Image: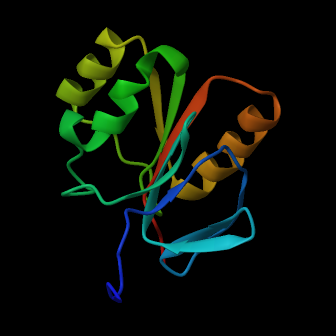
Amino acid sequence: MAKGIVIREAHYPGRAPIEAYGNGGFRFADMSHRGSLLCLPSGINGWEPADPLALTAADFDKLFAEAGKVEILLVGTGKDLRPLPAALRATLKEAGISADPMSTGAAVRTYNVLLAEDRAVAAALIAVD
């Protein structure tokens, strides 16, 4: 008997450079994703923070599950650089993760370089139009 359409959480099981961004999404590994991304050592996940302008530790639960594998977190905050809330910075620091906020374009470029160097990097990328 047919089950119908099964919707799964967006996840790519591996590390891959981001090939392009804009128009509300990203291209990587010959695929495209509409919306924001959380790039972790375990793979690339669809990511929709509750409020992109007010990120909280809860938005990074998947990251904290892999904190031992991540040294640097690049946070692409959209078209413009926005500082991370102090509480989030403190929580990341407690987990041993250095967080660097920057525009999404700068975060994508930096992520690709650090990924090519096989560094312990993660990226939280807010989609831009």
- Residue 20 is left or right of residue 87, and the answer is right
User: In percent of the image, x 54 and y 24: which residue is there?
Assistant: 72
Residue at far front of view: 1
Which of the two residues, 100 or 33, is positioned nearer the viewer here? 33
Of residue 101 and residue 15, the one placed in the foreground of this image is: 15
Q: Position of residue 89 (x, y in %)?
A: 29, 24
In-front residue for pair 41/129: 41
Q: Residue at x 42, y 20 (%)?
A: 67
Q: Position of residue 69 (x, y in %)?
A: 53, 19
The figure's colour scheme reads rainbow
Q: Nearer the viewer, residue 83 or 68?
A: 68
The vertical placement of 9 against 64, above or below, is below
The correct choice, above or below, for 113 with respect to 70 in the image is below
> What residue is at 25 percent from the left and 20 percent from the top?
91
Total numbered badges shown on the rendered structure: 0
Q: Position of residue 120 (x, y in %)?
A: 63, 23
Residue at image x 33%, y 21%?
Answer: 92
Residue extending furthest toward the right? 116
Q: Residue 5: give x, y in percent of width and height.
A: 36, 85
Looking at the image, is 24 positioned above or below residue 74?
Answer: below
Quadrant location, the N terminus:
bottom left
Judge from the rendering whether residue 45 lies leftward or rightward of residue 93; answer left or right.
right
Residue 61, picture quadrant: top left
